[in-house]
Image (cartoon, rainbow, N blue to C red):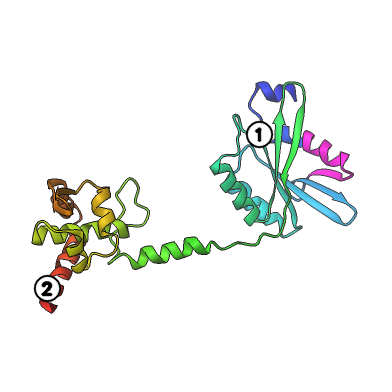
Amino acid sequence: MAAATKNKILEKDLYKPISEYLKAKGYEVHSEVKDCDITAVKGEEMIIVELKRSINLTLLLQATKRQRITDGVYIAIPKPKGFKWDKRWKEISTLLKRLELGLIIVSFLKTTTEVEIVFHPSVYKVRKNNKLKESIIREINGRSGSYNVGGSVREKIMTAYRENAIHIACCLEKYGELSPKKLNELGTGSKTQSILSKNFYGWFEKVSRGVYTLNPEGKQALENYSEAAKYYRRLIEKKEKSD
């Protein structure tokens, strides 16, 4: 295995250390049986190990196909260079667990190899995140429409918070300088004071104690978010007529 540390590690380099590991655990080990990279049998138990240089879709498809034969299916990869259990690896581990696959990592050291069973295949029960679900419902309820395009990258997303700020901006555009109290009366909601004081988008200016106006950046924002601005301008007009 010393050669594997100097050159690129191949799938076949994984076989010997995993085979020796399983034999030491009492398994009878065979390779390339019915397209399975490694099969190991001990009594009534059978496990299958699929070998790859890295985790990819092909490996996952192969491994899940092997689950038609046995529940004990593992995938095995060389330990990646600079490996650490960061957020991405935790997400990968969660995916493998949801697929009910086991994970084996082989470390190629200078004079030896180490086989680590990171986790075994097991039944996975999805735990629902009710807090996250509730926050999504609140966000949906806080939006007036669907202004975003699914899959957009590096584009500013229209959130309920941004819509609230646009509503405030539209009120200031129509009526001029206003207090949070007056804006609340116009229907801008309980977050009005916070949005104005934090001024996260830089759209507002405090002209005197408790009184705000719309600055040039805010006027430009109404042009940039014209669809949402159009909705809130109509809403303001509707309220004006009903009052």
Where is the C terminus found, in terms of image quarters? bottom left
Which of the 4 quarters of the picture holds residue 147?
A: bottom left
Q: Residue at x 15, y 53 (%)?
A: 212
* Upstream in sequence: badge 1 or badge 2: 1
Question: In which quadrant of the rendered image does the N terminus lie?
Answer: top right
Q: Secondary structure at mark 1?
A: loop
Residue lying at 65% horizontally and 53% vertically, measured from the top left: 97
Q: Which residue is mark 2?
A: 240
Q: Residue furthest front?
A: 209
Q: Which residues are magenta?
A: 16-31
- Number of the label disc, if any, that sits on residue 68: none
**Residue 227 percent coordinates (x, y):** 20, 61
Q: Give the number of marks.
A: 2
Tell me if residue 83 comes above or below residue 28 in the rendering: above
Badge 2 element:
helix
Look at 20% across and 63% down and name the residue there.
181
Residue 33 to residue 159: above or below: above
Front residue of this view, candidates 96 and 40 = 96
Task: Tell me residue 238's x, y (percent).
Answer: 14, 74
Q: Amino acid at mark 2?
A: Glu
Q: Quadrant of residue 122?
A: bottom right
Q: Are marks 1 and 2 in contact (CB under 8 Å)?
A: no
Q: Amino acid at mark 1?
A: Lys
Q: Which mark is residue 79?
A: 1
Using the numbered discs, state the Cα–Cα distance from disc 1 to disc 2 in whole angstroms. Answer: 66 Å
